[in-house]
Image (cartoon, rainbow, N blue to C red):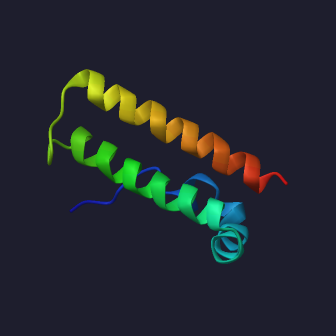
Amino acid sequence: MSHTPHELAEEFPEHVEKMSALKQSDAHFAKLFDSYHEVNRNVHRAETNVEPIDTMAETELRKQRGALKDEIWSYLQK
């Protein structure tokens, strides 16, 4: 499979160490982190037609990914 874009390490490269620490110390952050990666992989599979889905479902996945990313960003700003 090709490189999956929008990975959190690429989105927030200056916060890689903080994300790693938060995954270890904060269960809620760890769940957000894992959820983001699962949704992001689903979006990528849909975009590359590995697992095609209808347009509305793909749009909803992108919205979900955005909401998770926003919540993760708020954690990183603390």
Q: Quadrant of the C terminus?
A: bottom right
Q: Position of residue 1 (x, y in %)?
A: 21, 62
Q: What residue is drawn where x is 54% and y is 61%?
A: 31
Left or right of 38: which side holds 51? left
The count of marks equals 0
Q: Position of residue 75 (x, y in %)?
A: 74, 53
Q: What residue is drawn where x is 63% and y is 71%?
A: 23
- Residue 69: name its quadrant: top right
- Residue 25: name its quadrant: bottom right
Left or right of 8: which side holds 59? left
- Residue at the extreme right of the image, as rendered: 78
Q: Nearer the viewer, residue 34 or 18?
A: 34
Q: Nearer the viewer, residue 39 or 9?
A: 39
Left or right of 31: which side holds 61? left
- Residue at the extreme front of the image, as rendered: 27
Q: Nearer the viewer, residue 57 or 14?
A: 57
Q: What residue is drawn where x is 65% and y is 50%?
A: 72
The answer to whether 54 is drawn above or below residue 67 in the figure is above
Q: Position of residue 9 (x, y in %)?
A: 56, 62
Q: Position of residue 54 (x, y in %)?
A: 19, 26
Q: Nearer the viewer, residue 15 or 38?
A: 38
The answer to whether 6 is drawn above or below residue 66 in the figure is below
Left or right of 19: which side holds 31? left
Q: What residue is drawn where x is 40% and y is 49%?
A: 40
